[in-house]
Image (spheres, coloured by chain):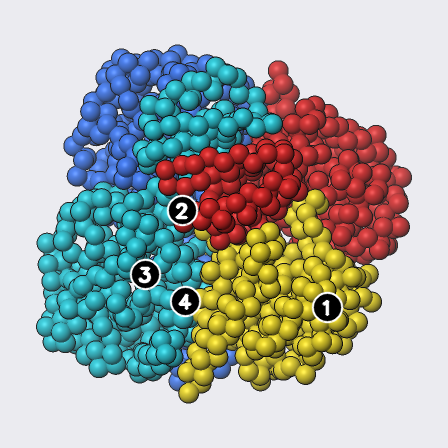
Chain colours: A red, B yellow, C blue, D cyan
Amino acid sequence: MIVALKAGTTPAQREQLVNWLAGMVTEVHVVEGTSCTVLGLIGDTRRIDQELLESLEIVDSVQRVSEPYKKVSRRFHPDDSVIEAGGVKIGAGFCVIAGPCSVETEPQILDVARRVKAAGADVLRGGAFKPRTSPYDFQGLKGEGLRLLSEAKRATGLPLVSEIMSIETLDLFEDVDIIQVGARNMQNFDLLKELGHLDRPILLKRGLASTIKELLMSAEYIMSGGNEKIILCERGIRTYETATRNTLDLSAVPVLKERTHLPVIVDPSHATGYSRLVPPMALAAAAAGADGVMVEVHNDPERALCDGPQSLTPEQFAELNGRLRKLLAAMEA
Amino acid sequence: MIVALKAGTTPAQREQLVNWLAGMVTEVHVVEGTSCTVLGLIGDTRRIDQELLESLEIVDSVQRVSEPYKKVSRRFHPDDSVIEAGGVKIGAGFCVIAGPCSVETEPQILDVARRVKAAGADVLRGGAFKPRTSPYDFQGLKGEGLRLLSEAKRATGLPLVSEIMSIETLDLFEDVDIIQVGARNMQNFDLLKELGHLDRPILLKRGLASTIKELLMSAEYIMSGGNEKIILCERGIRTYETATRNTLDLSAVPVLKERTHLPVIVDPSHATGYSRLVPPMALAAAAAGADGVMVEVHNDPERALCDGPQSLTPEQFAELNGRLRKLLAAMEA
Amino acid sequence: MIVALKAGTTPAQREQLVNWLAGMVTEVHVVEGTSCTVLGLIGDTRRIDQELLESLEIVDSVQRVSEPYKKVSRRFHPDDSVIEAGGVKIGAGFCVIAGPCSVETEPQILDVARRVKAAGADVLRGGAFKPRTSPYDFQGLKGEGLRLLSEAKRATGLPLVSEIMSIETLDLFEDVDIIQVGARNMQNFDLLKELGHLDRPILLKRGLASTIKELLMSAEYIMSGGNEKIILCERGIRTYETATRNTLDLSAVPVLKERTHLPVIVDPSHATGYSRLVPPMALAAAAAGADGVMVEVHNDPERALCDGPQSLTPEQFAELNGRLRKLLAAMEA
Amino acid sequence: MIVALKAGTTPAQREQLVNWLAGMVTEVHVVEGTSCTVLGLIGDTRRIDQELLESLEIVDSVQRVSEPYKKVSRRFHPDDSVIEAGGVKIGAGFCVIAGPCSVETEPQILDVARRVKAAGADVLRGGAFKPRTSPYDFQGLKGEGLRLLSEAKRATGLPLVSEIMSIETLDLFEDVDIIQVGARNMQNFDLLKELGHLDRPILLKRGLASTIKELLMSAEYIMSGGNEKIILCERGIRTYETATRNTLDLSAVPVLKERTHLPVIVDPSHATGYSRLVPPMALAAAAAGADGVMVEVHNDPERALCDGPQSLTPEQFAELNGRLRKLLAAMEA
């Protein structure tokens, strides 16, 4: 860690800071410049709070040379992690997760499940607990939704992914193979800590305005609790552009693959908000090196009018899946 | 609500949409343009999901004419709400909340409490549960921190504000006059719903990347549960600018005062991240019409080196408070 | 165009507004709602200034149903435009533009030109006028740089693209086949107007914080002057994320392809700022449907230490080009 | 300047980099850490291109300890600069600039000029060349607009500020006391260089998505040419929030006042886009320590319907000016 001091720092102020830092790291190396002084901290600097240090009056800036995360870092775990969930290996080959945004009825979820399975999906997604901006919007079928997902799982053999919003509902997720943490809860640290004690894969979505580093720190929360089965998901970030719902940050895929050994998937449905943008962005995600995509699929174009229009139809999904497989085959060849 | 249809929409598609919408609102008015058709929806459109409608293939855009919130809206409650907490009336006169970021020790919190009280603070702040980006950073004294805050309250008579991170810890907050929801939890809807059942003032901070509308919708979550004692807090938003920790959006103050009857305060300490920027931005908040400010104050410049440097000293706070009172007096004259 | 009026609007205010608008469009249709009134404007609303209208005290919001651009719109020109430059057809097949960020020396540009040509590049890029944040940074070889580019063109037959910063230097660009407008000049309207009088292809880069709509409006500036040979370029937008130089907005590719008939290319070198991110993002751009990519290539890994490290080596470029061609072939199959 | 190298850097790579850097600075100090090596560069590092260095494969990060700007820095010029323009001293006392967005007619500009003068304005603003997103929007009266401004100056004695878009129109600005560079041209470096050769005050507006550092670098462009009479203007930045046109970044005021000796003013009219938000944000700007504000004022509420609704009426302006003076008096007392 490198700490640059401001020009007017007195020797007494500097000494006080050096002494304080010396109690926390192996060595504090002082470099005197023409217009300022720089401290080089050597040792384990993870326990030093960077923001705090930066805000000191005499400190000009602080730069961390090693990352603040450890268990998620590829530096300490060079090989790709493969997360097994219900017989599917995520991180080994391309994984396609598909299903409706919300579970609505038994016929709906059974039909979608069968059709995405037939079209080649690896995992079934479906929301039972829905985080909604407005208290007046539909909040999901909750426990009943999870029960219907279990039926779809039994009928098709597809493993399940579904979002949890509160640890108090954990018992209802017994049959869910991958527990999803949504973008709004990426920094709900109490929830992350609880999930860290499970032995179940967690799909952690990037927050709407979270940095790549913060996403990795949230994964570190889960891993530091003991649960190392984490799948990261890029789902669009908030920017000034309004032509799409959010801005899909596909560069995050190769950046994450460099920094961590965890699998990285992409959700083009929520990122763009428009079904016609899902196929090009799913293909782009595969080309960028993602380990999979998660796309919304609904079964009923009539009902879709009111409940799934950012979703693909099963036919569109089947076509996309075919194009994905062709692209992936060409890239491997 | 105004729904613009795309140019190529067929009569059959249009009819299907009109029929669906007609089941939800009082009247659907069709306006035929030269190049497109527009639907005017008349009635209670709050139950229509705007995002969903926007994502329909035949829909060009949707525009809500009335706000999606009701209880927080000034339209239905023209007078300013005044929230009483421990004898202090927030929303009637300017309110100054001060105290340390984290509660550390009994002497620390007692000393800070006495000194901010002497300098004119109205409410004492102090963090016992701390949301931290890294699992390796200090997470607060928790229950013990709240116990120490109670002592400071008894010693000074100042009402307390402190942040809750999980509803499971609610029992520990018995003595806390105002329960804070932090920026990272602004869309933790399960937590908001639980707080909606309390009869205790809630200080709701704007999320790091939340819009003003989303802040109001989160307040609506709490109010729709029955708890109408809400104080809103602008604390900086995430932008590309790195010269300050976040970008304090002071224009949000007059915008919020227009749209809602709830009191609005400003936190310049977290927004800017630098103690030297706190006084100018606190004064600016007062000039912009805020109902109060919340500032960090620590008692020990020596310790501050490692633990509170974005905070003001009690002396700096006293000086700021004097300048605030002078500015407010001049504005009222 | 749909204009929603605020709740408290008086009949007199409304009449005044309706009369004013009636002088500009074919018809003003008034729709009375339960809580507000909406005006539907029918006719050519391009001459109405939307921002101005929105800022009226009695206006709640304004929504444009037809786009404010015309010549760039796919609505009026459904077929893809193909821009011919030096024998290359951009918009018909995938186009690869390659070359150094800056022209440095004759051996450098000749060597790079020959090697990217051998590796399959279609167009040679090279900067002679360089926009730099600091006045103390290298500003390019200017006229001499353009002369060296001409030599490289003669030696290889590759058409040239190079950036113009001021119309006063136009004479120097005689041999340049495609004139580039950089991100910082995307809204230098005086420059756009001048380029509108040329009969030369223009490569218009999206501004660092420009919306897709603003990019199209800037293209409209050029087209409205008579020059219809425009190639659009997505090159990353400014967001809060610092892991990459900018955030490459690949969703802009399918969005632009919907809205306009103009070809769309992607610059992954400037967007990401790191050479190792260029291949995955170039492949992703192709998968997303871009008409081409523009990548930086340098010839000398030794010199690259100080002058081209976000660039690919010719070998890396050749490998990328091979992978691109394979991916494109698979997508067409 | 501090350069952190990546973990896997070989001794040969490091030596090559050190040798290259050694040719540019006084001394390169090598600090070996447990997991990486850091270079401390001592001497004049302004000629080193930071972005370039950062993009080297072996470089982890680069941190500039001294600022890349010099002439604008307060470090080398501790006292506030005072810019004199037509008898008004900007930077010594609070300066109020007022006038219409666009010059329209002789009666309009004369009337507004007289009324803002009577209400206490120090400088008259008026746009003759208007940068507009659409080529179909009104582009200003150009030379005729500047002639009308001259008349208003003669009639009232108020100095003038007006925006230049191209150096070719400079002759028309003979009577303009302060030449404005708009947000869209903040990085039109060719224009900045030309203005650097003048002996006339320049009002430099912050770009829509420019950092504070980039604003200072653009000022450095002008100053490095010899013209040291620069006034900086914060006018809102582009963020995800849509409740206001842009997000007024008032924290930029104290940050700029720390870093530079140049005067800093604020434009709340363009930043917020709504006249009702102008008074609170103008007052907030004064409280935050700005050296002045620039506000739009129109004279004709009837015409304002179509041409100046983000502007204040002269009466509103007079009231605001009175409140500003009261606030400033209280802050000085």
Percent x, y of residue C206? 39, 42
Q: Answer above or below: position of C203 versus A57.
A: above
Q: Are marks 4 and 2 on the same chain?
A: no
Corner quadrant of residue A130: bottom right
Mark 3 highlights which residue? D264
Question: Is residue A46 something that shows in the picture?
Answer: yes
The chain identifier of the residue carrying mark 4 reads D
The chain identifier of the residue carrying mark 2 reads A
Tell me which numbered mark, 4 or 3, is placed earlier along the sequence: 3
Q: Do labels 3 and 2 share a chain?
A: no
Mark 1 highlights which residue? B149
**C-alpha span from label 4 to label 3:** 11 Å
Please identify, in this view, whether the residue under mark 3 or under mark 2 is nearer the observer. 2
Identify the residue at the far front of this view: A12
Mark 4 highlights which residue? D288
How packed mark 2 is, by other alpha carbons closer than 10 Å (few <14, some 14-19, many 20 or more), is some
Q: Answer above or below: position of D59 versus A57.
A: above
Percent x, y of residue C145? 23, 25
Percent x, y of residue C234? 43, 38
Q: What element carries label 1?
A: helix
Q: Answer above or below: position of C67 versus C294.
A: below
How packed mark 4 is, by other alpha carbons closer than 10 Å (few <14, some 14-19, many 20 or more), is many
Mark 2 highlights which residue? A7
Could you say which is closer to the camera, residue D135 or residue A229? Answer: A229
